[in-house]
Image (cartoon, rainbow, N blue to C red):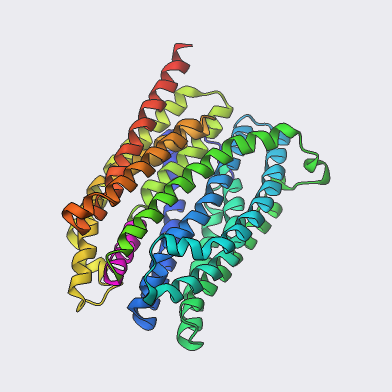
Amino acid sequence: MALDMTKGNPLRLLLVFSIPLIIGNIFQQIYAIVDTIIVGKFVGALALAGVGTTGAIFFLVNTLIIGMTSGFSILISQRFGAQDTKGVRYAVASAIILTIGITIIVTFLMLFLIDPLLELINTPADIYGYADTYITIIILGIFTQTFYNMAAGILRAIGDSRTPIYFLILACIINIVLDLLFILQFDLGVAGAAYATNVAQGISALLCVIYSYTKFNLLKLKKDDFQIPKEYFVTHLKMGIPMSIQYSVLSLGIMIVQGAINSFGSLYIAAYTAANKVLNLSLQPLLTYGVALATYVGQNKGAQNFQRIKSGVNTAAAMNIITSIIIWIILTLFSRDLLSLFLDESATEMLDNAVMVLNYVSPFYAAVGFIFIYRNAIQSMGRPFVPMVSGAMELTARIIVAYTLPSWIGFAGICLADPIAWIVGAIPLIIAYYREMNKIFKH
């Protein structure tokens, strides 16, 4: 069901939109976690480290596409908020064409870059084979991620955050079953985990596309909807390219940090991989508030209702602070219990290092939450430049910390790379948002 976010209480709207996303994202993280548990327990610690070390490369590929498709959804939400039916169809049709072209380019480019990227992040020889096998299969199936993100982004732009989640939950269940089948029954190792992810994501993408077409008359595109005015492609690219660059700059920073982690050896890689699974799961509410706000701001920008934008951003910021404190407390109290899902309790050194990661990172969750909120607000208002600058600042801070602090304080220096980068990235976004709002209300 489409949700008009130009009317009604901002807190209720953001919660109604966010809760299905949180549930779906948690399920998505769960099936990533299941990959990790099964690989770690049944294939081995080296295989776990191999899969873990590819996370930064996969994030680079995925964020290139997510950034682009997220940028495309901004125009769709703005046309929907302006009640421009034909404009919505033009925006959707042009987004489909651009997404297909970009997916083909990214897939072929990344296949040529796998070995150079694995060498760039200093992948240890004992896990290189696992890493190469896993990431190659994932990239060959990246189109499944692309089409799911495109279809889900279109539905979210018109206010339907629930339907993509139902299909994603189904994909999670399929992924778990296929993990067990491919790894335990067919003995495919890390390749089995990659195949399971691609097949499951492909099913959710197909269902999402079919549902979008059959359920919403607004999205039933006809031949004349593809006679698209040039400005729709231009606007999509103006939004999508900066967001894609910003996301890929962030992922490049994470990749560089992965290289610094890899220099510590396989035990530290496995510890950091396990900690990141917990961190990624616990970050989902904060990420979701930003996604919800992107649709909320986009629709209200289309309706030219800036007072509602201000109220919505303030509400999301308060939700972020409260949620961050709750997550910090939970991770502080139960860090070892959560990490034991991925690591054998007898591996005390790995567990200690993973606990260190959680203890250093979790107190700074509010900062990354502010990045999600203010970045999405600014981008949905049609101002992509400052978020791109913020991403570059975040990248610079992450690199400096990852390659200086460890020489002074060891692995703890790696743990501080994300928190410091988040703070550096959040500051310009907050300043830019309030400057933009002050300009609007002065006029």
Q: Nearer the viewer, residue 390 or 215?
A: 390
Which image quarter: residue 234?
A: top right
Q: Is residue 300 above or below residue 253?
A: above
The answer to which of 167 and 11 lies nearer the viewer is 167
Q: Residue at x 55, y 33 (%)?
A: 299
Res 211 → quadrant: bottom right
x, y (%) of residue 92? Answer: 68, 43
Q: Is residue 268 magenta?
A: yes
| Residue at image point 58% right, 28% down | 302
What is the magenta segment's predominant secondary structure?
Answer: helix
Toward the viewer: 350 or 22? 350
| Residue at screen point 44% across, 51% down | 251
Residue in front for this viewpoint, 80 or 175: 175
Horizontal and vertical percent for residue 194? 51, 72
31 relative position to 90: left or right: left
| Highlighted range, magenta | 266-281
Is residue 70 highlighted in magenta? no
Figure disc tally: 0
Residue 318 shows in this picture: yes
Q: Is residue 210 above or below residue 270?
A: above
Can the viewer see residue 8 in this picture? no
Q: Position of residue 323 (x, y in %)?
A: 29, 46
Which residue occupies the extreme top position in the image? 443
Is residue 357 depicted above or below 175 in this figure? above
- At x 52%, y 35%, the residue is 5
Residue 122 vs 430, above or below: the answer is below
Q: Find residue 33 and report its horizontal and vertical position in percent.
A: 39, 68
